[in-house]
């Protein structure tokens, strides 16, 4: 796709922060998912307290499925790339946060965990990248 991650203007000679790059990757992922027909429910959902988790995007698919999305950004594919950086520990935290989110709902819809990898300006969407099995 070749989408630029950073726009720098003449007044800015500093490199963007990791947070700014992450926010830009989330913006790109959100736009990509919305073009695919998903609807944003929440962004940066956090569980209270220590040891909790954060879900970058919570979306609803056209069929009603609640989609918990982890967005990962990497400059290159070295060390396995963006998608491979979603470790078992990160998955466990995402599942914990998703369960916390679902407790607020009257009826639990079908759910899945997706990963959107933004790497070298390209977007790769991995629906059902992992499941909550056993956690």
Image (cartoon, rainbow, N blue to C red):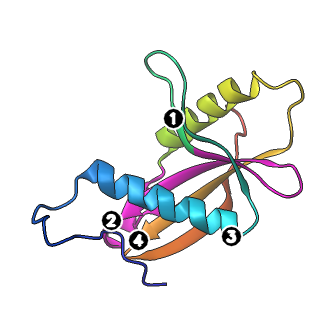
Instruction: Please name the residue that numbered disc 3 is placed on.
Output: 35
The answer to which of 6 and 93 lies nearer the viewer is 6
Q: Is residue 111 visible?
A: yes
Name the quarter where the C terminus is drawn: top right
Q: Is residue 15 left or right of residue 49?
A: left
Tell me if residue 77 comes above or below residue 106 in the rendering: below
Q: Is residue 48 above or below residue 78?
A: above
In primary-sequence order, the first of circles 3 and 1 is 3
| Quarter residue 2 falls in | bottom left
Q: Nearer the viewer, mark 1 or mark 2?
A: 1
Instruction: Find the residue positioned furthest to the front.
Output: 11
Local packing at callout 2 (Cα closer than 10 Å; few below 14, some 14-19, many 20+) is few
Is the Cβ of the residue at disc 4 closer than 8 Å to that at disc 3? no
Reading the chain from its start, which is encountered first: label 1 or label 4?
A: 1
Residue placed at 40% from the left, 53% from the top?
23
> Would you name the residue on which mark 2 appears?
79
Between label 3 and label 1, give the one nearer the viewer.
Answer: 3
| Left or right placement of residue 60 versus residue 83 in this view | right
Q: Position of residue 97 (x, y in %)?
A: 60, 30
Using a 10 Å C-alpha cutoff, classify the residue at mark 3 as few (fewer than 14 neighbours), some (14 to 19) or many (20 or more). few
**Farthest left residue?**
13
SS at circle 1? strand
Q: Quadrant of residue 106?
A: top right
Residue receiving disc 4: 119
Q: Are marks 1 and 4 in contact (CB under 8 Å)?
A: no
Range of residues picked out in magenta: 57-86
The vertical placement of 89 against 103, above or below, is: below
Q: Is residue 82 magenta?
A: yes
Q: Earlier in the sequence, mark 2 or mark 3?
A: 3
Residue in the picture at 74% in, 59% down:
38
């Amino acid at each position: 796709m070749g989408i630029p991650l950073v726009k720098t203007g003449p007044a800015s000679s500093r490199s963007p922060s990791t947070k700014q790059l992450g926010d830009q990757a989330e913006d790109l992922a959100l736009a990509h998912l919305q073009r695919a027909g998903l609807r944003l429910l929440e962004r940066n959902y956090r569980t209270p307290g220590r040891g909790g988790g954060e879900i970058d995007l919570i979306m609803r698919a056209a069929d009603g499925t609640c989609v918990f999305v982890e967005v990962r950004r990497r400059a290159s594919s070295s060390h396995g790339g963006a998608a491979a950086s979603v470790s078992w520990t990160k998955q466990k935290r995402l599942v914990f946060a998703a369960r916390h989110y679902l407790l607020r709902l009257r009826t639990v819809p079908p759910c899945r965990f997706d990963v959107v990898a933004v790497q070298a300006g390209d977007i790769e969407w991995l629906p059902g990248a992992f499941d909550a099995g056993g956690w």
